[in-house]
Image (tube, helix red, strand yellow):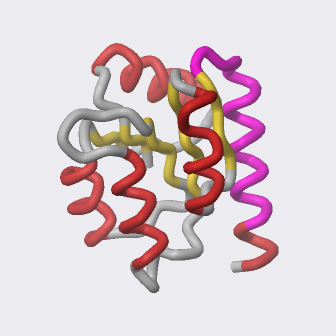
Amino acid sequence: MLIEDDDAAREFYTFILEDEGFRVRKCENVPEAIKELEQRIPEVLITDLAMPQVSGFDLINYVKSTPRLSALPIIAITADGDGYRKLALGLGVSWFLVKPFSNEILFDAIKDSLSKKRITG
């Protein structure tokens, strides 16, 4: 699942991920993502951190405090690396990526998260 409020970024990430063979459920904001998470649990959650109204940090807190979601691997993406890194890692994200990042780094983060999930989950 991909949560990104910027339309162009959301479509770009969706395109490169689908081109790499991943199935992508995309959401524009955190409330939409929470509705989706109530329906089905994705294998990996990729979320922007800086979003209006409800932030990616709020989503991470929701996921980590919900027993059926708490083991879900989370990849946090943001343009504000220095300000958010410590907080995001402290909340338990699996990967923290600072925009701009290469497609390969994102693919590696997803594959690593999936392999760890298979081993532990």
Residue 82 x %, y %: 62, 28
Reply yes or no: does residue 115 show up in magenta: yes
Q: Nearer the viewer, residue 71 or 52?
A: 52
- Residue 57 vs 29, above or below: the answer is below
In the image, is 99 to the left or to the right of 103? Answer: left
**Residue placed most toward the observer, 90 or 49:** 90
In this view, 18 is above or below 37: above
Residue 98 image point, x, y percent = 62, 26
Asked if the magenta segment contains residue 14, the reply would be no
Residue visible at 74% across and 29% down in the picture: 105
Q: Quadrant of residue 85?
A: top right
Q: Residue at x 71, y 55 (%)?
A: 113
Magenta stretch, main secondary structure, is helix
Would you say 114 lies left or right of 71 here?
right
Picture layout, residue 71 above or below residue 57: below
Going 77% across and 38% down the picture, which residue do you hit?
A: 108
Quadrant of the frame with the C terminus: bottom right
Q: Is residue 86 left or right of residue 51?
A: right
Place residue 11 in its image quadrant. Answer: top left
Q: Position of residue 7 (x, y in %)?
A: 28, 20
Q: What's the magenta region?
A: 99-116
